[in-house]
Image: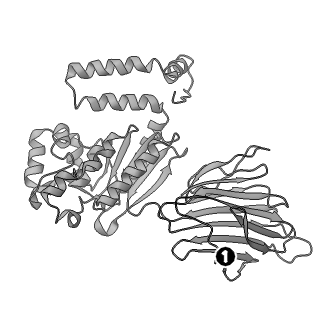
């Protein structure tokens, strides 16, 4: 769900994912695109005349979303305790119900419904307004007043929290932004009962998350990980068990898995536990692999009567050499993290509980550089696997020359000469 949220006075919410934080320039009316779920604070309280406006577009196949507001006031001389006020608006698409629930002094009222009028339409825009008047809130949707909430509190000096929660956009993965500056995209495979087996839906969601991070100007690197027990134990065999040759060939089965290797931003695999079959292939699609001490890599497809289908015979051979690749592919045997590092498959090995944090640190270091030039560097290194030495050197030289057309190259060299830290603008 795409949302905008703003107030009509001098506050607006920052564009963040899940972080509390507010913080606005004075006397400006600015709206920002928000990602669901969202939470943030608003300074200045709810004074008469103030509005909070939530504008958005309903998903094509929505389930539900909530908008909640929590306020508090300072202790009055006439009051025995601090009074808090909370308001929650819930849209339930299956039942076509728009509900309001309110709380005063820690006690929730009974849910009130706006039926028979349900104001939201699939794949269409909407506008929710919360008006603050003297001792009450009025709630409008698309200009229609649906609720009138009398809280009877004289002064609400702060809005402690506003939240927007929608249906989870992903079923098989967890998505976040990590790092001190939130500049590292983070994708965690989340099918623990199946040891993160790579079903079609999971890989489509990974592709969707990668597209989101690719278009996020704040993100400079991406980390993909699983659980401590399994990065990914392979493709979902139950899903592919009954596929026919005709289906696989005409539908170009597994073609969309290659999305991971096509991303311009650097991708780091943080591998713990099993990285077998498709899981090993997924890790090899990434640009850097960090492994936990107990990680295991393998291509056991031969034991199932088939062969690797997403780069296992190609990427593995280029990385570890023909002999080891042949042994792994023809026997289905696994190699340890230490052997993987020795063969060049993995760049570093860490204790299991440190792999993800170390991968994020690496991502932060990469993200601190020019994103534009990082993409050039990644293109040049990847070309080494595709081109002859002469052709690769020619491409490298062209990309090197191209970097001189960027403002970041000028800034980097100037900062070096002036003995200061470079301030890259990705231009």
Q: Which residue is mark 1?
A: 114
The reply to whether residue 289 is in sight is no
Residue 253 position (above or below residue 410): below
Q: Is residue 328 above or below residue 217?
A: below
In the displayed structure image, the side of residue 390 where residue 175 appears, left or right: right
Residue 18 in which image quadrant = bottom right
The front one of 204 and 360 is: 204
| Side of 235 relative to 176 (left or right) | left
- Disc 1 secondary structure class: loop
Tell me which colouring the rendered structure shows.
Answer: one colour
Instruction: Estimate how packed mark 1 is, as few (under 14), some (14 to 19) or many (20 or more) residues with alpha carbons within 10 Å.
Output: some
Q: Residue 422 in the image: x percent, y percent?
A: 54, 26
Q: How many discs appear?
A: 1
Residue situated in front as seen by the camera: 244 or 426? 244
Q: Answer left or right for 132 relative to 266.
A: right
Estimate the x, y position of residue 404 in percent, counting from the top left: 45, 17
User: Does residue 378 appear anywhere in the picture?
Assistant: yes
Q: Is residue 337 left or right of residue 324?
A: right
Horizontal and vertical percent position of residue 197:
27, 62
Q: As drawn, which residue projects farthest toward the bottom?
A: 110
Residue drawn where x is 32% and y is 55% of the image = 203
Q: Position of residue 316 (x, y in %)?
A: 18, 43
* Residue occupying image coordinates x 79% and y 59%: 45
Which residue occupies 22% across, 30% down? 386
Picture quadrant of residue 170: bottom left
148 relative to 259, above or below: below
Q: Nearer the viewer, residue 341 or 282?
A: 282
Residue lying at the far right of the rendered structure = 78
Q: Residue at x 50, y 69 (%)?
A: 63
């Amino acid at each position: 769900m795409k949302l905008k949220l703003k107030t009509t006075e001098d506050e607006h919410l920052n564009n963040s994912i899940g972080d509390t934080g507010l913080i606005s320039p004075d006397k400006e009316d600015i709206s920002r695109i928000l990602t669901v779920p969202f939470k943030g604070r608003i300074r200045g309280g709810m004074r008469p005349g103030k509005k909070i406006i939530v504008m958005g577009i309903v998903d094509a196949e929505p389930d539900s979303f909530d908008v909640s507001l929590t306020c508090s006031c300072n202790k009055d001389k006439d009051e025995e305790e601090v009074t808090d006020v909370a308001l929650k608006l819930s849209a339930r698409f299956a039942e076509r119900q728009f509900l309001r629930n309110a709380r005063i002094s820690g006690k929730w009222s009974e849910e009130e419904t706006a039926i028979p009028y349900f104001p939201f339409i699939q794949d269409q825009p909407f506008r929710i307004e919360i008006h603050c008047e003297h001792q009450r809130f009025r709630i409008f949707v698309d200009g229609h007043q649906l609720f009138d909430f009398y809280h009877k509190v004289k002064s609400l000096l702060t809005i402690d929290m506003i939240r927007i929660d929608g249906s989870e956009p992903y079923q098989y993965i967890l998505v976040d932004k990590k790092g001190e500056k939130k500049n590292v995209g983070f994708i965690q495979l989340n099918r623990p009962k199946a040891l993160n087996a790579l079903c079609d839906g999971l890989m489509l969601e990974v592709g969707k998350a990668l597209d989101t991070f690719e278009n996020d100007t704040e993100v400079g690197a991406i980390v993909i990980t699983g659980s401590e027990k399994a990065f990914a134990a392979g493709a979902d065999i139950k899903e592919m068990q009954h596929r026919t040759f005709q289906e696989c060939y005409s539908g170009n089965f597994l073609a969309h898995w290659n999305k991971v290797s096509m991303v311009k931003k650097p991708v780091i695999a943080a591998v713990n536990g099993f990285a077998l079959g498709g899981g090993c292939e997924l890790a090899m699609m990434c640009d850097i692999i960090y492994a936990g001490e107990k990680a295991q890599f393998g291509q056991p497809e031969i034991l199932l009567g088939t062969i690797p289908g997403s780069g296992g015979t190609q990427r593995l051979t280029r990385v570890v050499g023909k002999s080891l690749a042949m042994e792994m592919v023809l026997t289905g045997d696994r190699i340890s993290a230490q052997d993987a590092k020795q063969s060049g498959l993995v760049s570093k090995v860490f204790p299991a509980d440190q792999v993800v944090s170390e991968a994020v640190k690496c991502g932060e270091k990469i993200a601190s550089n020019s994103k534009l030039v990082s993409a050039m560097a990644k293109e040049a290194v990847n070309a080494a696997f595709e081109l002859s030495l002469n052709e690769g050197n020619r491409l490298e030289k062209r990309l090197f020359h191209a970097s001189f057309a960027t403002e970041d190259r000028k800034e980097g060299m100037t900062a070096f000469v002036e003995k200061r830290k470079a301030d890259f603008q990705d231009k």
